[in-house]
Structure formats: structure tokens, C-alpha cells
Amino acid sequence: MDKKNGSCKPCKNNAFCLIALIVVCELLGSLGAIFTAPNISTWYALLNKPMFSPPNWLFFPVWTILFMLMGVALYLILQNDEKKLAIERKIARFWFATQFAFNILWSFLFFGLKDPFLGFIGIIFLWVSIVLTIVSFYKIDKKAAYLLIPYILWVSFATILNYFVMILN
């Protein structure tokens, strides 16, 4: 990391860094699975869910793709080394880390604690932090922001689903 301008010099046009960031996002994303996986066929299966609830098998491939897109988006942000965007990059990295923390926290609240209400509170914070990440990424690299659109759409759907699970149970 170049402290002067907030860019990641080793990531400049580096395929290894791109792959590493995707792998890191996938690994960090899998932390939520620690809370989710053991409860899908037990606790979650017993909950009343709305009729638009997707099948359980869909969640793994969707999240795998979303974490990959997050890694690519972060790579685009880190490879930017324009000095005039140094503060924007720091803000973007902050929001990216924040949304990732809320992503993992949601899995803990909803599945780990088995609490749809706390999950709903958590997913609201997640949604807001994703929007702020997209806005901050847009200021640096529009493609990076666009790569996060499927993520905000999925979390918007998950927010509605979480709400209905909370109401129905």
C-alpha cells in the first residue's frame, strides 16, 4: 500500500492480485457459512417462509458469484493510483470493509443466534453500507460500482425475505 496516495502499487495491473482479492473475498464470505450451513436443514427448514422464498440450493452459487464480483470491484479500486482520489479510496476501502463486516454479522444474527428480528436490523445496516460502498466506488471507478449492483439487488431481495420470515415466525 502506498501511504501517500492510498493506492495498492502491487495490484497495478496484476493478475495475481486480482485472483488473491477474489480468493480473500470468497474466504471472508465463507465465514458467514459457519453460522448458516449447520442451520439450513434444521432451524431454517422449520421456519415459515413466504412463497417467493428461493430454494436453499440457490444461495451458495449466488453468494459465490457475488463475492467474486466484490473481489473484482475491490481490485479496480485498489489499482487506481490517481493522487486526487486518495481520500476517496480510503473512504471506499472503509465502506467496503464495513459492508463485509455487516455481511458476516447478518449471518451470525439471523442463523447463528436464530433471530430474524436481529437479522433484519443487521441487514438494514448491511444494505445501507453496500449503498455507501457503491457510491464511494462510483467516484473512483464506475465499473467497480456497477459490479456491486447484483449484490445490492440480492441483498434488497434478502431484506424483503428476512422481513417476511420475521413477520411469519
Image (tube, grey):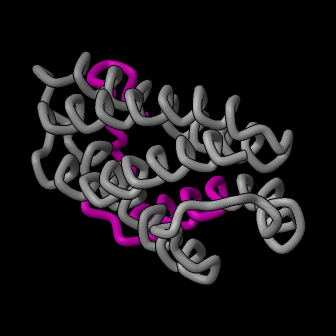
In terms of depth relative to the viewer, which is nearer, 2 or 79?
79
> In this picture, which residue range is highlighted in magenta?
1-29
The quarter of the image holding the N terminus is top left
> Residue 132 in the image: x percent, y percent?
30, 27
Q: Which residue is painted at 41% across and 29% down in the image?
A: 129
Q: Which residue is painted at 41% across and 35% down in the image?
A: 127
Compared across the picture, whether 13 is left or right of 124 comes to: left
Q: Is residue 11 visible?
A: no
- Residue 108 in which image quadrant: top right
Compared across the picture, whether 102 is left or right of 95 comes to: right
> Residue 55 in the image: x percent, y percent?
58, 79
Compared with 107, 133 (above or below) is above
Q: Which residue is painted at 62% across and 61% down in the image?
A: 49
- Residue 91 in which image quadrant: top left
Instruction: State yes or no: residue 8 in magenta.
Output: yes
Compared with 103, 47 (above or below) is below
Instruction: State yes or no: residue 100 in magenta.
Output: no
Count numbered badges in the picture. Answer: 0
In terms of depth relative to the viewer, which is nearer, 11 or 61?
61
In terms of depth relative to the viewer, which is nearer, 141 or 168?
168
Q: Is residue 25 visible?
A: yes
Q: Residue furthest bottom?
A: 57
Q: Main secondary structure of the magenta part?
A: helix
> Residue 56 in the image: x percent, y percent?
64, 77
In terms of depth relative to the viewer, which is nearer, 120 or 14?
120
